Structure formats: C-alpha cells, structure tokens
Image: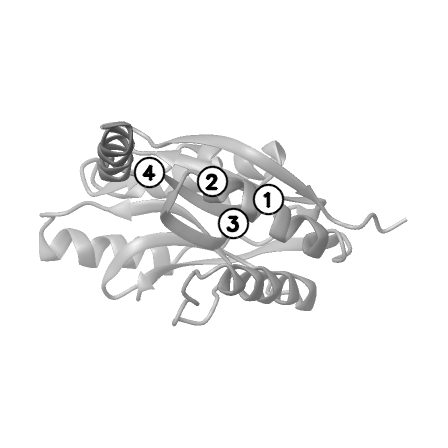
Amino acid sequence: MENSHCQKKKIMLLSLPMKTIRAFIAITLPQSIQHQLAEIRDTLQKEMEETTVRWVNPANIHLTLKFLGEIPEKDVTNIILKLSGEIRLHPEFQLNIQGIGAFPSVQQPRVIWAGLQEADALMRLQRSIESKMKELGYDTEERPFSAHVTIGRVKQHVTHQQIVNCGIVVARQDIGGLDGFIVESVELYRSELTRGAPIYTRLHTYRLKPRF
C-alpha cells in the first residue's frame, strides 16, 4: 500500500504544470540616453497620427542581446552560473547611438528603432552569450544580430497610408550628436506582459571587466 501511495504521489507531482517565466538578456541604457531617446520619440510622435504607433516607455528601452522567451523558472540559476564567468572576461566598452530606422524597412515600418554602433566588443559579447546559451540547450538566433533599441511599434490595423506616412517621418529624421556611454554590465530580466507596458524585473547583473 505504501509503495502504491508513493507512486500515486509521484504521478501527481509529474503532472503538475512546470512554472515558466519570460526572460531576456540585455544591456540597460543609462537614464541620460533614455531621456534623449524619449526626446526623439516625442519629435516623431508630433509628426505622426496619434493612433499609429505604440511607443516604448523610456525606462523600458534596452539593447537586447538574447531573447530567451518562455523558460523553466528552475533554469534561472543555471543561466546565472553559466554566464557569470564568461561575461566578466569581457572588458567594458563604449557604445554610441547611430541613426534611426525601421524594420522591415522604412517603406513598410513595423518596428521603429534607434541604431547603436556595432563595436567589435559588443559583437564579441553577444556571440559569447549566444554560444553559452546554446550549451544550455537554447536555440541560436537564425537572423544576424542587429544592434538597435526599439522605441516604437506600429499598431495593427492601421491604414496603408498611415504606414507610408510613418515611414516618411522616420526616413527624414537626423539624430546626430547623441551622447555615447560605457557599457559596464549586462542584465538578465524577467518580462511580464500586461495590457499596458510590460513589466521588467532584473533577476541578475553581470559585471564586465573594468577597463582600469
């Protein structure tokens, strides 16, 4: 009887749904850069119809290095341990905001972004993270890494003319002269989707190797 009871209990435990979280690895932008991007967003917003684009909260603007999607909550510890030793081998480096554009194109904009200079140090860091996550069983991103931060997404069900006008506004913007910044750390985030803006919770901070 005892063995039967244990087996039933084990079956019940196995049938329980696995807890998952939505997660990603990113570089957090300093507030000074977030504020400058907010000014760019405001400029774009004034030239577009109000209902065309869903703008990103400046506090949520970040540079995604690896989107993990829905992952088992129990994997978080393994991810922290796997990346900690690797990321601290990479020295701090500078990034600069460079240009503005849209995916898949300014002719058919769906995502509005500000570009970041693709410094060699950034590319090495991203490839290193991609490689370590592959060792943990996470798929490698098929598309080449593009250094950008999303500042807005064109809403669904907008008219063709609204999309065209959005692309025209983006194409004529000049955002030269923004501050650069030193990347000192990488963060592992949890993302909770809501009816409004997503809620990002920092799960871990990985420090890069100090330059001095």
From the image, tell me which residue sits under label 2. 61
Q: What residue lies at 40% left-to-right and 32% top-to-bottom?
A: 57
Between the C-alphas of marks 2 and 4, the distance is 10 Å
> Residue 152: horizontal and vertical position, in percent?
34, 44
- Asked if the residue under mark 4 is in contact with the one under mark 2, i.e. CB atoms within 8 Å, the reply is no
Q: Residues within 10 Å of mark 3 (few under 14, many from 20)?
A: some
Give the mark nearer the N terminus: 1 vs 3: 3
Question: Looking at the image, which residue is at 28% across and 27% down?
Answer: 2
> In the figure, is residue 103 to the left or right of 163?
right
Q: CA distance from mark 1 to mark 3?
A: 19 Å
- Mark number, residue 63: 3
Badge 1 crowding class, 10 Å Cα cut-off, few under 14, some 14 to 19, many 20 or more, is some
Question: Looking at numbered disc 4 in the image, what kind of residue is underneath it?
Answer: Trp
SS label for mark 2: loop
Front tag of 2 and 1:
1
Left or right of residue 57, residue 211 in this image: right
**Helix, strand or loop under label 3:** strand
Q: Nearer the viewer, residue 81 or 57?
A: 81
CB contact under 8 Å: marks 2 and 3: no
**Disc on the earlier residue, 4 or 3:** 4
Answer above or below: position of 21 versus 120: above
Residue, disc 1: 80
Q: CA distance from mark 4 to mark 3?
A: 16 Å
Q: Which residue is mark 4?
A: 55
